[in-house]
Image (spheres, grey):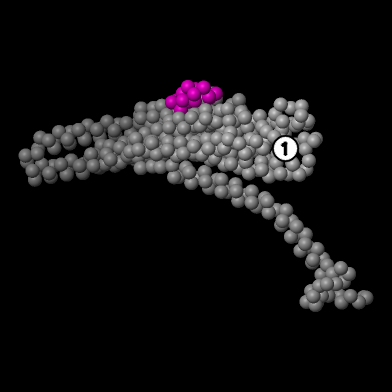
Amino acid sequence: MADKCASLPMFARLEGVKESLSTSFYDAIAPQIVPLVSKGLILYLVFVGILVMVEPGTFRDRVIKAGRVLFAATIISAALSTTGAVPAVQEFIIGPLERLASNIGLLVFQQAEIDADAGNGSVYGSMACTVEKGIFHVVQAAWHLTYGIRGEEVGLLQIGLSQFIGIIAAIGIIAPFVFVAGIFAAYLVEALFKYYAISMLSPLLVGAWVFPFLRPFSVAALRVLLGASLTVIFAAFAMAFSIKMVGDYGDKLRLVVDCASTIRNPGELACRGVEDFYSYVFGAEYLALVIVGFVAILLHLKAASLASNISGAQDSAAAAGATVAGMMKTLEMGWNKAKSVPGLAKSGYRAANSAFGALRGGGKGGGQNSGDRDISNQFIGDGGGA
């Protein structure tokens, strides 16, 4: 269900903020660009006039080029002066590219027979929710491996051993699939930011298009937009391929987890509990699922590379990968700190007990050194009566 997806509200909110800020920034910046275009046009015409005087033979060609620039400056200045409506550059360039990418991404999931969520109007939320359903159920099932084997006829030693092995096995599955889900979300957020950033700068980029020597900046912005769209499309291809590859391996994982956690009498269950748990975590199907996870990482990293190669934008998956790696490192640090809490509590108890013994100045604290006695005597006396 859409309401059960944790990612849907976040992406719906991001889309709403992007749309509102893009229009408001355009309306604020566009009027400031018109004077720049006008002054730049004057300088350009003066420069053309000087060149014509220096090289009279080029009069016809230069006048034709100047006429084109003048016509472009007139149209663009009129467009930049119009505010309050959806800007033309967003309606006819940025918007279509964004909608094309998101709609193709959803279509890829549908053609792969993956249940694509409607998303309540949020296309990015729909894709993120689809990935959440397709990947996180494998992560949740792998997490249950850490519980090991439970049952009335299973000994404590068997439970402890199975939990230790289950933790190692779970990490092998969870790590790559969490990374894949994270980098897919990072691609979506990165694409949103690129559309948003180019939308904000679009008045300046449109104004730059007037002058031939500034057009490479506008072309570079178009390449960035194309790269963002292709990244979303290729990432959808990679994610659909990954989810389909998980398929039966994920179903087998859930069966093993259910068996291990609900065992009562191993002889009466077809899954045989203990035997199936160990045969799975040491078997080919578990290894295949781990390999699928790392193949999915490779596919998603190549998605950004393909998009960059085709669009010509100088971009890569380094930023998204580093962000997800940083997130996982933070989680690892938090886990290590959580594991150290029992040790800290034990050390604190020992320190408090030692201090209490020192302050008593006798009894079980009699083994303290003379320096400790001198300190304790300052607080409770030297052991004599009052």
Q: Name the residue located 74 percent from the left edge and 60 percent from the top edge.
A: 347
Residue 124 in the image: state x and y as whole percent.
50, 30
Mark 1 — residue?
Answer: 149
Q: Name the one closer to the observer, 315 or 210.
A: 315
Name the dominant secondary structure of the magenta segment: helix
Is residue 200 at all visible to an observer of this figure?
A: no
Q: Is residue 314 magenta?
A: no
In the rendered view, does 139 fall on the left or right side of 91? right
Q: Name the residue located 60 percent from the left edge and 48 percent from the top edge.
A: 332
In the rendered view, does 302 fall on the left or right side of 154? left
- Amino acid type of the residue that numbered disc 1 sits on in the rendered structure: Ile
Which quarter of the image is occupied by the N terminus?
Answer: top right
Residue 135 in the image: state x and y as whole percent.
56, 33
Quadrant of residue 146 in the image?
top right
Q: Is residue 110 magenta?
A: yes
Which quarter of the image is occupied by the C terminus?
Answer: bottom right
> Which element type, helix, strand or loop, lies under badge 1?
loop
Quadrant of residue 9 in the image?
top right
Q: Name the residue located 37 percent from the left edge and 38 percent from the top edge.
A: 308
Residue bounds of the magenta highlight: 103-116
How many callouts does the rendering have?
1
Is residue 299 at all visible to an observer of this figure?
A: yes
Against 386, is 345 above or below? above
In the rendered view, does 119 fall on the left or right side of 94? right
Residue 380 in the image: state x and y as whole percent.
85, 72
